[in-house]
Image (tube, rainbow, N blue to C red):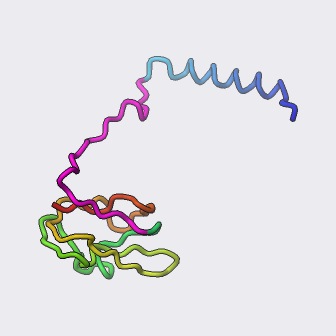
Amino acid sequence: MEIDKKILVKLIQVLEDLKKSVKGVDIKTSDNVVEEEIDLSDKIVVKSPIVGTAYLAPEPGGKKFIEVGKKIKKGDTVMIIEAMKTMNHVPSTSDGVVKEICVDDGQPVEFDQKIVILE
């Protein structure tokens, strides 16, 4: 495959112009962002079993399955994850008290993503 040298020259020129135009501007990069680290050594983390959309209540405007500070038992539904028009109830993996809910209602979640932290 042969690369057109005119395109490369134009690309380099555009990048140099961009570099000049942002000179002196503070640009935040992912290297500058510090995430808050939470000690999870004594916590129980419930993770998403599938990719989908998380719902914290059985219906819009309904009572949430869990709230921060609520005691739950192993097997209690912590949320629903919808995947391919199927509503999948996610059970708690352990007894505990809800310390943090790591996703918002309607938020997409990935497989093995942290969704709830129990104490």
Which residue occupies the foreground of this view, 60 or 92?
92
Counting every numbered tag in the picture gives 0
User: What type of secondary structure mainly makes up the magenta span?
Assistant: loop
Seen at 23% across and 60% down, the residue is 44
Seen at 56% across and 18% down, the residue is 20
In this rendering, would 32 be left or right of 5? left
Check if residue 64 falls in the magenta segment.
Answer: no
Seen at 26% across and 80% down, the residue is 62
Which residue occupies the foreground of this view, 30 or 114?
114
Quadrant into which the N terminus falls: top right
Query: Which residues, given as a range, are shown in magenta?
Result: 26-49
- x then y, percent, for residue 30: 42, 35
Seen at 35% across and 79% down, the residue is 89
In this rendering, would 28 be left or right of 73? right
- x then y, percent, for residue 35: 30, 40
Image quarter of residue 71: bottom left
Which residue occupies the foreground of this view, 94 or 33?
94
- x then y, percent, for residue 68: 16, 64
